[in-house]
Image (tube, rainbow, N blue to C red):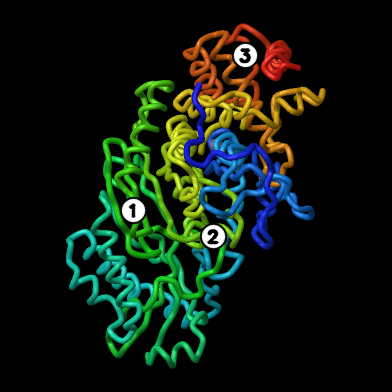
Amino acid sequence: MTEVIDEQDGPDKARPSPAGSGSVTPNPRLADPKNLEPKHPDHARPNHERPQHGAAQHAAGAHQPEHAQPRTAGQLSRRAVLGLAVGLAASAGYLGIRQIGDDPNTGTAGPTPSSTPSTPDEAAEGVRRASLGGAVLQQLADAVGNGDRAGFLAAVDPRSTGFRDEARTVYNNLRDLPLAVFRMRYVSDDPGAIEPDRLQALGATEAWLAQVEVTWQLKDFDAKPARAILPVTMVARGSETYAASFSERFVSGQRRPIWALGELHLLDGDHSLVVSLHQNADLKAYTKLVDQAVDSVTEVWGRKWRRKTVLYLPAKQNQMEQLLGAQPNTYGQIAAVTMAELDQPQPNAPVRVVANPKLFGELGRQGRRIVLTHETTHIASNATASPVPLWLAEGFADYVAFTAVDVRTDSAAAELFKAVRAGKGPKGLPAPEMFAASSAELPIAYESSWLACRLIAETEGQAKLVQFYRAVHASKGQDGIVKAFRDVLGTTEQEFVQDWQRYLQRLAGA
Ligand SMILES: [Zn+2]
């Protein structure tokens, strides 16, 4: 066994967080166990996120975290880095967050049906605006499809100079991305959203805010198109209508496409596409790591998946939040998130791994590889739309990651073993609420789930573990896990838990 941590090893000891650095404000929906459970078997977790070891303490709020994440590069303790690897994810809350962002009732974020027209005149006005705005969108989308830069810029307000620069960047980004599909659809508008002083600044006769559904699909990577709602300011000058902003009245908690956030730098590998907002990121190194992650996952899971991973590298924390549609500071302690780039979870959704720019930068190569292998396992196993219980989804992802990158068990399961030796070992398989970002049991939930999966692989063989996972994934009813224990492993959950408890006792030397 080799150590997982390379250059950033350190004493296995908690460090106090520097003053002011521990302000994680979890979204309450993330912390709500109800959000961890899919409402329907086919509508499950839109993402998996991985807070740092210590996120639980941060998220729990009031007291100073015991295992705070050191903030300076080169100071990560082994424990903190392993925390990334086995640390937690409040996987399911994302749907909640995104619904806040795109909920028509929360303001301008979503596809707001424009103020319900109360008179025939208002209805006719709405139709007129939709027709003018729709033509602008068509021109923008056609220009992207045809590689017509001049055509694209002809639809952009000539007097909004700042936005013209931004629009050039968006155009370049969209041309650089391997797009199979790019569409813009006028969903709704709000003529009252543009304040009088803004209208005056625009110098326009008329301006309104349209909510636009943008659909795009990455060639070779996406089975289905990604979707987002983009606010587009429309401005009328005489007989012409133009786009004058893609971010007017943008609200935090609203998801934004990566190509609207700044200049993109792209590189693809054998199985990877790295899309970076960071101009100095070592894209080659990242494609190599993602390619390795895909190979590692394929070795365990088999070849029957797309074997492609898209990695988003935001340059700043707020870009990560915008990509995810998260409130500020929610993701301060989270290394990476696997998200479906859609408003509704569904099988074969376009899934991206979104890295936390700061924490990823601080991680060593091995740590990044563990995180990327874990997240890629979620992609291969369709975990964003699966009835698989969290302990199995997260335990399996860690099983694959720790099979690819050898780690010392007593380092990777330190919290769990401490509990077991103190006679406080788990009574049962980790419940969904243990995976909430606010859960104090976050590290133990991950560590014990990982070892549950490892026990199956050690006693029944890795192929059985995969078969077990697939059986639960394919199940429709609540009893899928019961059946899988019986039919695949020839046991019951109760018996398995007893075996697992003995296994943990033995490993912990209790
Ligand atoms: Zn995960």
The residue closer to the viewer here, 301 or 296, is 296
Q: Disc 1 marks which residue?
A: 216
Q: In whole angstroms, how far apart are the C-alphas of marks 3 and 1?
A: 41 Å
Which x, y percent locates residue 343?
49, 51
Answer whether residue 38 is visible to the viewer in this image: no
Judged left or right of residue 133, residue 366 is: right
Q: Earlier in the sequence, mark 3 or mark 1?
A: 1
Q: Earlier in the sequence, mark 2 or mark 3?
A: 2
Amino acid type at mark 1: Trp
Q: Nearer the viewer, mark 2 or mark 3?
A: 3
Amino acid type at mark 3: Phe
Q: Earlier in the sequence, mark 1 or mark 2?
A: 2
- Ligand 1 under 8 Å from disc 3 Cβ: no
Q: Disc 3 marks which residue?
A: 485
Q: Residues within 10 Å of mark 3 (few under 14, many from 20)?
A: many
The residue closer to the viewer here, 27 or 56, is 56
Q: In whole angstroms, how far apart are the C-alphas of marks 2 and 3?
A: 39 Å
Picture disc at residue 102: 2
Which x, y percent locates residue 231?
44, 69
Q: Secondary structure at mark 3?
A: helix
- Give above or below for 152 relative to 217: below
Which x, y percent locates residue 27?
66, 55
Occupied quadrant, residue 230 = bottom left
Q: Secondary structure at mark 1?
A: strand
Judged left or right of residue 400, residue 234 is: left
Q: In whole angstroms, how far apart are the C-alphas of marks 1 and 2?
A: 18 Å
Q: Secondary structure at mark 2?
A: helix
Q: Residues within 10 Å of mark 2 (few under 14, many from 20)?
A: many
Q: Residue at x 26, y 75 (%)?
A: 155
